[in-house]
Image (cartoon, grey):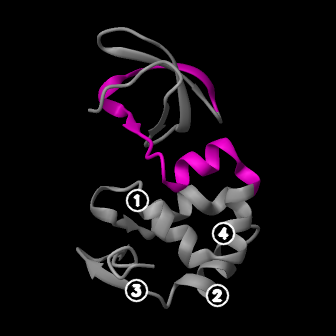
Amino acid sequence: MTELANGDLIRHPELGMGQVIDMDAERITVSFRRGGERLVPARELAPVSLEGFWREAYSDPEVAARRLSEHPADAVALLLRDFPNSEAQTTEIRQDVEEFVSDWAAWWLRDLSTRTTRRARGRSWWSGILRRGR
């Protein structure tokens, strides 16, 4: 895990985005955007990219919502920067953007379902947008 410091933004797989407020050798106290303060093991946290969607969504949710509405493919490309190998399952994308779009199904079908997708292990994954320079 990357070295974290007080004030850093992190992401927890179940609790979402948060900000580090205190640390010791094994556990970190995080103030989560949804869920308040929690003490969590460091191994459960992922640092947030300075250029990724998660940082934008945490620091300026209105900008994130506008990007998803006006430029959905660019928003997903930005979101993919936050995932290992720039790949994410459809359910992971949904988890991260659903609070910003009024109707997930309509947004997904209208804007993204026909874009670059590939099948891996029977699940839908997004990949390739960043590799094509979008």
Asked if residue 18 is among those painted magenta in the image, a careful observer would answer no
On the image, numbered disc 2 is attached to which residue?
A: 110
Specify the amino acid type for callout 2.
Arg
Quadrant assignment, res 122: bottom left
Reading the chain from its start, which is encountered first: label 2 or label 4?
4
Which of discs 1 and 3 lies nearer the camera? The answer is 1
- Circles 1 and 3: CB distance less than 8 Å? no
Mark 1 and mark 2 lie on one chain; the one further toward the N terminus is 1
Screen quadrant of the N terminus: top left
Q: State the SS at label 3.
A: loop
Distance from the alpha carbon under mark 3 to that under mark 2: 14 Å
Instruction: Determine crowd level at label 3: few under 14, some 14-19, many 20+ residues with C-alpha closer than 10 A.
Output: few
Disc with the residue nearer the chain's start (1 vs 4): 4
Residue, disc 3: 116
How far is mark 1 from mark 4, CA to CA?
15 Å
Where is residue 123 drawn, in percent x and y? Answer: 33, 74
